[in-house]
Amino acid sequence: MNVMFIFQNVINGVTIGSIYALMALGYTLVYSASRLVNFAQGEGYMLGAFATLFALVAVPEQSPAFVRAIASGVAAMVAAVLLGWATERFVFRPLRNAPPFIPVMASLGLAIAIENTVLNLFGAGFNNVPALWPLTGIQMADVRMSYVQLVMLSVAVLLMVLLDRFLRSTLPGKALRAVAQDPTAARLMGISTEAAVALVFVVAAGLSGVSGYFVALYYGSVNFYMGFQAGINGFAAAIFGGFGNVKGAIVGGILLGIFEAFGSSLVPAEWKGVIAYVLLLLVILIRPQGIFGEALPERL
């Protein structure tokens, strides 16, 4: 195992790990505000990826790359955000007074329904996504970073910074933190917990849509099952870092991406999807509170 092999896998791992971090942040936001887990979040990722495909096919190939990039990115965001809004409004909100496992199971049922609908409409095979940027990239010695990876990582980091600023420096963000800290006290202060929960569902869905957009461009194909695997990876990353912890979600996502990158290089490709499950099981057995769970278990 030479140095270049290590560097290349770290780059690949951090890049895809940034996507897992965005997915984990979505779980963290929803859990912090509602104390519930939305298992339909991965389907926002999948719908965002399919919306990217449809937009790239619909926009003329002769159009400038930035026009196609913006159009497909907006399509991915809109598709995912609409799902997030609908999930909160028509699934979680009517069940807000039910036992916690009821809305969680309802979200799982919604995820299965969406997945099977896409399967019936588009089949079980992979649908190829038109390339948006050149396949070339930055290369130093034997270490390479494609343009898609560079843009993906840059946007993911930017979104993480913007989310942190939003939570710490804006009134809606402070309201979300207050709801996460103590919902009863937040209500007494005049904060609408219902509006706060609706907002986090939309923000989490937007993060899923962006993730699906970049993964569609990165791998060059989409399929009906991709949302389930992405949801599991994001959930595993959130638990790894400490469920309900923003910093933990980011660190957990990056570390999961790095483990997966090295694992994919050392084991057959068909075992790649097992890595997140194994890591999830180990964390639950060894340190169920996650890396940062003790410091900040359930707060933004």
Image (tube, rainbow, N blue to C red):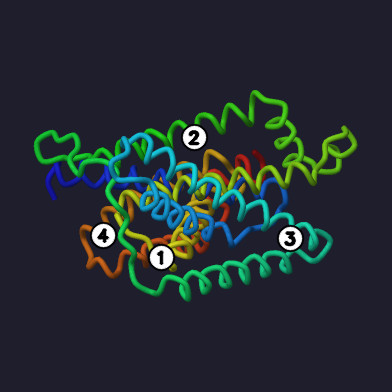
Badge 4 marks a residue whose secondary structure is: helix
Instruction: Identify residue for label 4.
Output: 264
Instruction: Identify residue for label 3.
Output: 90
Nearer-N-terminus badge (2/1)? 2
Please state, as top left, top right, bottom left or bottom right, where the C terminus lies in the image.
Answer: top right
Badge 3 marks a residue whose secondary structure is: helix
Q: Nearer the viewer, mark 2 or mark 1?
A: 2
Nearer-N-terminus badge (3/4)? 3
Nearer-N-terminus badge (4/2)? 2
Q: Is residue 107 left or right of residue 102?
A: left
Query: Hey, what amino acid is under mark 1?
Result: Val
Instruction: Identify residue for label 2.
Output: 159
Badge 1 marks a residue whose secondary structure is: helix
Query: Hey, what amino acid is under mark 3?
Result: Phe
Label drawn at residue 278: 1
Q: In the displayed structure, would residue 286 be above or below residue 115?
A: above
Q: Residues within 10 Å of mark 2 (few under 14, many from 20)?
A: some
* CA gap, disc 4 and disc 1: 14 Å
* CA gap, disc 4 and disc 2: 27 Å
